[in-house]
Amino acid sequence: MTKKKKYYTVWKGHHTGVFETWDDCKAQIKGFDGAQYKSFVTFDAAKKALKGNYKDYIGKSKTFKSELSEAQLKKIGQPNYNSISVDAASSGNPGKMEYRGVDTKSKKQLFIQGPFEEGTNNIGEFLAIVHALAFLKKNNSNRIIYTDSKTAMSWVRKKNCNTKLQLNEKNKPVFDLVKRAVDWLNTNTYKTTIVKWETKVWGEIPADFGRK
């Protein structure tokens, strides 16, 4: 299958503009603190976005059509909108990492952390779930959590971040958060249900950063 052409808008980076390849985009954001970028399916859309505000485009869903049958779609049903959705983004693995949580229906951002100089997508997904658990408990909320990471769900169940990333000076802030998250899991109880987001049915999770 031929990979669809994408165009990359960079609002903040070594150079700003619209770039036609991921490698060109990556060169603008690598090592740039607080880089802002996203992919688009047409050049015109990317050019229009460049004139706008990054926050107005982050996480906006692309047109999505499920490949599942009508019977399969009906069986799975619609998302539970009494929920929050979490996701992480990492430019490289390891690389700059950030995570956030949003209201599933409105996509209103509830929390965001990062970008951190070095982390992995799995670590970000794990931290996002634990952050959401603490957020919901603090607000005495009965909402559920959606994540698209089975790995992170497993780590939360085991109360351990089983990453292979080694601690160093660059990623120490991330490991400090990991320690806090693990400590929270081991010293708190919660009734919140964590559910896998059905990407094949519903498209990208609402908290998706919509980049690469």
Image (cartoon, rainbow, N blue to C red):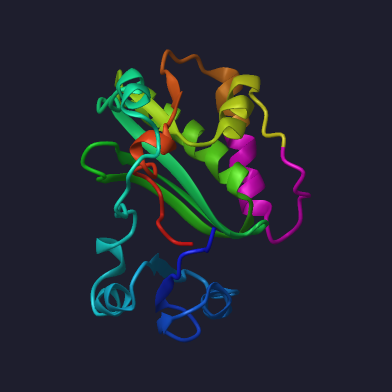
Viewer-proximal residue among 108 and 140? 108
Q: Position of residue 107 (x, y in %)?
A: 26, 44
Q: Is residue 165 left or right of residue 65?
A: right
Residue 97 lies, with reference to residue 23, above or below; the image says: above
Q: Is residue 101 left or right of residue 2?
A: left
Residue 53 lies, with reference to residue 162, above or below; the image says: below
In the image, farthest residue toward the left: 106
Q: Is residue 146 left or right of residue 189?
A: left
Q: Position of residue 12 (x, y in %)?
A: 41, 77
Q: Is residue 97 located in the magenta-colored stretch of the structure?
A: no
Q: Position of residue 11 (x, y in %)?
A: 37, 76
Q: Position of residue 200 (x, y in %)?
A: 42, 37
Residue 74: quadrant of the picture = top left
User: Looking at the image, how many numbered discs can be counted on the residues?
Assistant: 0
Residue 21 lies, with reference to residue 186, above or below; the image says: below
Residue 184: quadrant of the picture = top right
Residue 164 visible in the current orientation:
yes
Q: Which residue corresponds to the image point at 26% horizontal and 70% vertical from the top-left?
A: 53
Viewer-proximal residue among 107 and 43? 43
Q: Which residue corresponds to the image point at 46% horizontal and 69% vertical from the top-left?
A: 34
Residue 16 lies, with reference to residue 77, above or below; the image says: below
Magenta range is 163-181
Residue 140 visible in the current orientation:
no
Q: Is residue 179 located in the magenta-colored stretch of the structure?
A: yes
In the rendered image, the quadrant that contains the N terminus is: bottom right
Q: Which residue corresponds to the image point at 29% horizontal and 62% vertical from the top-left?
A: 57
Q: Is residue 112 left or right of residue 108?
A: right
